[in-house]
Amino acid sequence: MQSLERLYLSNNRLVQLKLNNNPIRSLKVLDIRHNYLLYVESNHKQFDTLEELYLDHNSIVTLKLSTNNKLRSLTLSNNDWDCKNLERLFEKVNRSVVGDSDRSCKQDYQLEHDLCCKVSAKPYLDRLVQYNVFASIVAKNQRAEGRCSANDTITRLQHLNSFVITKKELLQGTSQREAEINQLQNEIAQIEQNKSRFDQLHNDLRTEIDHNLRRYRVTKDGLVHPKANLRKLFKHLKSRRTFKEEETQSRILDAQRKMQDVETMIQANADLQNKLERKKANLTELKRNIKQRENAVKRLEAKYNNNPETRRITK
């Protein structure tokens, strides 16, 4: 190893780089591009001895170099730089040494020294919060697709906690780093509490689904995700609601038809009542006429009885 001059580790999916505390003096070229590196400051002694250092296309937040570094070629683009650290870095590195640049920056990032960086009081804590937000969105999408795994979440939290504990020794240089570590651990504890609440909420939802399946007499399918039974329940309730609405509409139409029949019967009854009243009036008029004629007959009979000539002729 002490005679090693070039070390090429690009595109190896590295998430951690920890070289020997005693730098390899013969090493002149180190290529660690296109990996997943986040923290590399612990390697600053080795970096100072290099002539060529390629760091682009990682997730590096901060970089530490001394003023007497020997770099003649350096690449830094496509990382997650902290603006304050980047400013301090270019106080120790000539811009002509840097052989690349960023063209455009994503939201909340700005271009400094032709490199994208983000202004934050606590860089690593800020990235952890950003990671948590992203992980939360991914977890929600997984739950929506039925791919949520509590075991995976616990494993990721354990790995993250292990990472923080491992890095604690490396980050003990400043009080700011200590504060960030404490904040990170508090965030992890909060995430675990949120995870417990989410698990309880998930169990409550499953219980509620089972309760409604029994309540509405829907057969529960076994060995399927709860959302499949929930869809089945919603489909049943929708069908039930459609049936109720159709039945209600049918009853409304039937009631309207009966109301029309009642109105027709009321009108017919009114017509018959009017006809009856007219006949009663005609009957009364007829009785009055008969009475008048009877009176006329009686007068004629009286007149006949009082006239002797009339009686003689009739005899």
Image (spheres, grey):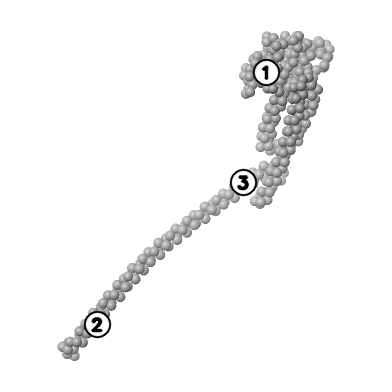
Disc 3 marks which amino acid? Lys
The amino acid sitting under disc 1 is Cys
- Return the x and y of residue 183 as percentages of the image width and height: 74, 28
Write down the residue under mark 1: 83
Secondary structure at badge 3 equals helix
> Foreground mark, 2 or 3?
2
Label 2 crowd (10 A; few <14 / some 14-19 / many >=20): few
Q: Which mark is residue 205?
A: none
| Mark 2, residue position | 298
Q: Position of residue 311 (x, y in %)?
A: 18, 89
Left or right: where 171 falls relative to 258: right
Return the residue nearer the eye: 86 or 131. Answer: 86
Image-quadrant location for residue 192:
top right
With respect to residue 159, does 58 lie above or below? above
Residue 68 place in picture, x, y as percent: 76, 9
Q: CA distance from mark 1 to mark 3?
A: 54 Å
Residue of label 3: 235
Identify the residue at horizontal 64%, vertical 46% (top origin): 233
- Residue 53 in sight: yes
In whole angstroms, how far apart are the C-alphas of marks 2 and 3?
A: 93 Å
The quadrant holding residue 144 is: top right
Say if mark 1 contacts mark 3, CB within 8 Å: no
Secondary structure at badge 2 equals: helix
Cα separation between marks 2 and 1: 136 Å
Q: Amino acid at mark 2?
A: Lys
Specify the quadrant that holds the C terminus. Answer: bottom left
Tell me where residue 239 appears, x and y as whole percent: 59, 48
